[in-house]
Image: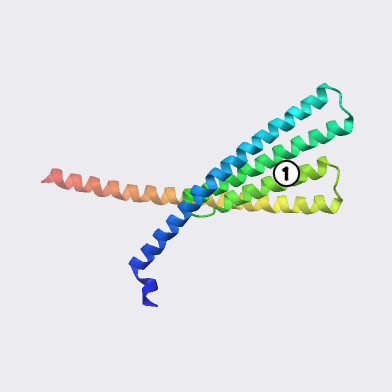
């Protein structure tokens, strides 16, 4: 059990972990990029289909179906972008940031609300449930932002106090040098 607290063992484990994360990134980033490109191509195809139905006076059911498909794919694209941001954040900071996850959750919940209302397949309880979920995610996001701003304010005050002490030390050192 002593080897678990050995510094060289911990360094080796961290090095293996970093190599593993980098290998996963090398595999996943091209897949994510391909997914985003395919999503854009699907949106462009749906837009072409929608415009084609609109220009040639297709049946209202086909026109409505093409429009709903276009809206659904655009909203899916926004969710993909949020998930891509979360993954890039994981690679950059080597941890999952709560704020990014909450942002992705808010985008996903808003997407679901829009789709349910847009397609007129909703019940009152569904909307109340989504509303409560969106409200709680929003409150959590606000609390996280306020606590982060307080942390930055505290860090800045602490930093300025340290800088003031260092400056006073440098000034007293300089005056001592000048006295000699």
- Could you tell me which residue is drawn at 41 percent across and 64 percent down? 13
In the rendered image, the residue lying farthest to the bottom is: 1
Left/right placement of residue 28 relative to residue 161 reads right
- Could you tell me which residue is drawn at 67 percent across and 47 percent down? 106
Q: Is residue 104 visible?
A: yes
In the rendered image, the residue lying farthest to the left is: 180
Image x and y of residue 91, in percent: 49, 50
Of the pair 171 and 118, the residue shown nearer to us: 118
- Residue 128 sits above or below residue 54 on the image: below
Left/right placement of residue 68 relative to residue 167 reads right
Q: Determine which residue is flagged by label 1.
A: 111
- Mark 1 secondary-structure assignment: helix
- Could you tell me which residue is drawn at 88 percent across and 34 percent down? 61
Image x and y of residue 93, in percent: 47, 51
Q: Is residue 149 visible?
A: no
Q: Quadrant of the N terminus?
A: bottom left
Left/right placement of residue 105 relative to residue 92 reads right
Image x and y of residue 114, in percent: 77, 42
């Amino acid at each position: 059990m002593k080897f678990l607290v050995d510094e060289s063992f911990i360094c080796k484990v961290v090095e293996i972990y970093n190599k593993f994360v980098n290998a996963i990134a090398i595999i996943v980033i091209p897949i994510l990029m391909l997914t985003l490109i395919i999503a854009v191509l699907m949106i462009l195809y749906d837009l072409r289909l929608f415009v084609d139905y609109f220009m040639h006076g297709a049946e209202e059911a086909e026109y409505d179906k093409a429009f709903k498909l276009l809206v659904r794919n655009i909203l899916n694209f926004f969710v993909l972008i949020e998930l891509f941001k979360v993954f890039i954040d994981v690679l950059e900071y080597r941890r999952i940031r709560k704020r990014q996850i909450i942002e992705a959750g808010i985008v996903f919940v808003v997407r679901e609300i829009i789709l349910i209302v847009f397609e007129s397949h909703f019940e009152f309880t569904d909307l109340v449930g989504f509303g409560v979920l969106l409200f709680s995610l929003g409150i959590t996001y606000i609390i996280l932002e306020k606590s982060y701003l307080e942390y930055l304010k505290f860090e800045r005050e602490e930093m300025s106090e340290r800088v003031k002490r260092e400056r006073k030390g440098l000034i007293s050192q300089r005056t001592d040098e000048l006295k000699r």
